[in-house]
Amino acid sequence: MGILSYNNSIIVIQNHPILRFRAKNAPPDTTPERACEPALGETLPDPPLRCAFCSHPITHPSQRIEIASSHEHTFFNPHGHLFHLGCFRQARGCITTDHQSMEFTWFKGYAWTLAGCGQCLRHLGWKFQNNADHFFALILNRMKEQKKQD
Ligand SMILES: [Zn+2]
């Protein structure tokens, strides 16, 4: 099984050598914009969208965008898994793989990389990019819109 397979298994992305390398060697990026958390004293109109597994802030409702005239898209991958995706301009709580692929791309002209939670590394979606543009297509039921439990 290729490391950049569309397979949505958690195991695949956790064993991805690039992600593991980054997770082990990169210092945690805790700058406010990267972490999607408001800076001290800053208020955001909505709480961030968080990883459904570990509550890490992933993106923000204000980052919702329309691609091909729609924010939400539903696609089957080549393995027959159905994904209900939302498009976001930025998802600073995600980490992405380095290798880009045009194989089976869902958005014409865009190459994709896997996007995972920056904290628990679970697969949350894909980053799509071409020379001029990029966006994230994130699996909506793997995120939750709620404040962190205290
Ligand atoms: Zn997570």
Image (cartoon, rainbow, N blue to C red):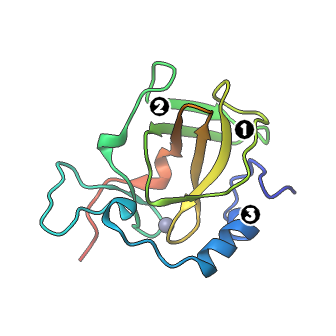
Q: Name the kind of residue labelled 2 in the image.
A: Glu
Q: Distance from label 3 to label 1 (Cα)?
A: 15 Å
- Which residue corresponds to the image point at 52% horizontal and 43% vertical from the top-left? 136
What percent of the width, then of the height, locates residue 5? Answer: 78, 50
Q: With respect to residue 48, does 26 lie above or below?
A: below
What percent of the width, then of the height, locates residue 150? Answer: 23, 77
- Which residue corresponds to the image point at 57% horizontal and 76% vertical from the top-left? 26
Disc 1: residue Cβ within 8 A of ligand 1's nearest atom: no
Badge 1 is on which residue? 77
Tell me the tag on residue 12: 3
Q: With respect to residue 149, does 49 lie above or below?
A: above
In this rendering, position of residue 135 left or right of residue 81: left
Badge 2 is on which residue? 72
What percent of the width, then of the height, locates residue 82? Answer: 64, 39
In this rendering, position of residue 25 left or right of residue 145: right
Mark 2 is surrounded, within 10 Å at the Cα level, by few (under 14), some (14 to 19) or many (20 or more) other residues, namely: some
Q: Distance from label 3 to label 2 (Cα)?
A: 25 Å
- Which residue corresponds to the image point at 39% horizontal and 61% vertical from the top-left? 34
